[in-house]
Amino acid sequence: MAEVALRPIEDADLDAIFEQMRDPESVRMAAFTAKDPDDRAAFDAHMAKIRSAPGVTNRAVTLDGRLVGTIAAFVIEGDTELTYWIDRSVWGQGVAGRALALLLDLVPVRPLHARAASDNVGSLRVLQKAGFAVVGTDVGYANARGAEIEETILRLD
C-alpha cells in the first residue's frame, strides 16, 4: 500500500496546491470555495494568512512523497474545524481517510468539527468512517455552484 504522510507546507508546494484547488470537478464537489479559484493573488494572500496564523495546523498531504493535497485544523468562532483537499487523481484510494487519521493524531483537541456539501458523499463517508457524527445541516452560499446549498455539519467528540 502506498504511504500517506503529512508534512509542513513549503513555498515550493504553492503552485501545485493552486492547480489542485482550481480543478473544476473538485471545485464543484467542494462547493464552498474561493470566489474565483483562478485568482492567484487571492490564493497567495489566503495561503500567506493561514500559514502564519497562530493556532492553525496546516499540512501538505503526500502519497509516496508526492504532494496530493492539503489538510488543516483551525479555530473559527471558538470551535476547532478541519478541512482537506485531495487531488482528484487519487480520489477513491483511501488517501483522505489516511490523511485524516494522521491529522487526528496530530491535533488532540476535541470536539473537532467539519462541514461538507450534503451531496459530497465521498467526503461525508471519509469523515464518518473517522468517527465524525452528523449533528445537523445548514444552508449557505456555495461560490462554486453560484447558489445556496445544504451542507452537513459533523462533530468528533
Image (spheres, rainbow, N blue to C red):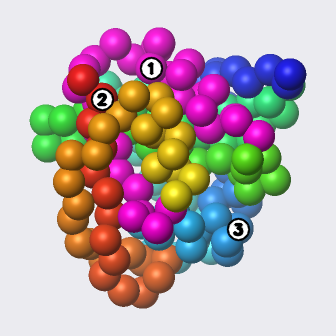
Residue that mark 2 sits on: 156
Question: Which of label 1 and label 2 is nearer to you?
Answer: 2
Where disc 2 sits, the SS reads: strand
Q: Amino acid at mark 1?
A: Leu
Residue that mark 3 sits on: 23
Quadrant of the rendering where the C terminus is positioned? top left
The magenta stretch is 93-120
131 lies left or right of 135: right
Q: Is residue 29 above or below residue 12?
A: below
**Nearer to me, 50 or 81:** 81
For marks 1 and 2 on the same chain, the one whose residue lies earlier in the sequence: 1
Residue 124 visible, this orientation: yes
In the image, is residue 84 part of the stretch drawn in magenta?
no
The mark found on residue 62 in the picture is none
Residue 127: horizontal and vertical position, in percent? 45, 39
Residue occupying the point 20% across, 54% down? 136
